[in-house]
Amino acid sequence: MKKFPMTPKGLAKLKAEHRACKAERPKLGEIILAARELGDISENAEFHAAKEKQGFLEGRIIELEAKISLAEVIDPTKLKGDKVVFGANVAMEDIDSGDVLKYTIVGEDESDVKQGLISIASPLARALLGHFVGDEVTLRVPGGSRAVEITDISFG
């Protein structure tokens, strides 16, 4: 089975969501039971909404359990090196505009571009992986490409 790289924070977040989903199961069961006791469920919108939510919840629980079991936890604070890899904080300068960009490469479920966290599976991360400080990298962006120079790589 394919392992999924993830930071300890990312794993903790998935485990917290898993606990929350499992805690919601009994509440949905009570709603469904109460709706059944009202009689005709064929026209009971609350019953159908609860059943739909229950199906989604069970699917999400299964998905979270799979992700947790296949997680390959990598702690960026224990990494070193001068090459862009999973967990790296990468600073780069746009060669044309001089804009400085900073991203951290994280697992797929941890990404949040607004927070500077990009998924290891994203085109941006894939373009940066394996490069060193001083390397010029061409990034494919909407509307064309953008040349950047990697100015710093750090971990933690």
Image: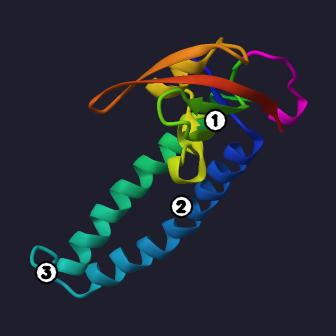
The magenta-colored residue range is 76-83
Extreme residue in the bottom direction? 38
Q: Please name the amino acid that badge 1 sits on.
A: Val
Q: Which of 118 and 103 is in front in this view?
A: 103
| Residue 40 tag number | 3
Give how far apart the Cα atoms at labels 3 and 2 are.
28 Å
The spot of residue 123 in percent (x, y) is 44, 24
Give how far apart the Cα atoms at labels 3 and 1 are.
49 Å
Q: Name the residue under label 2.
A: 21
Density class for disc 1 (Cα within 10 Å; few <14, some 14-19, many ≥20) is many
Tell me whether circle 3 and circle 2 mark residues in contact (CB < 8 Å).
no
| Residue 106 tag number | 1
Which residue is at a point 58% across and 15% down the rendered structure image? 136
The spot of residue 82 in percent (x, y) is 81, 17
Tell me whether circle 3 and circle 1 mark residues in contact (CB < 8 Å).
no
Q: Which of 22 and 41 is in front in this view?
A: 22
Residue 104 belongs to the span the image colors magenta: no
Q: Is residue 51 above or below residue 44?
A: above
Q: In this view, does 25 lie above or below 156?
A: below
Q: Please name the amino acid that badge 2 sits on.
A: Cys
Q: Please name the amino acid that badge 3 sits on.
A: Asp
Which residue is at a point 69% across and 43% down the rendered structure image? 11
Q: Is residue 75 left or right of residue 133?
A: right
- Closer to the chain start, of discs 3 and 2, is 2
Density class for disc 2 (Cα within 10 Å; few <14, some 14-19, many ≥20) is some
Q: Is residue 50 left or right of residue 4?
A: left
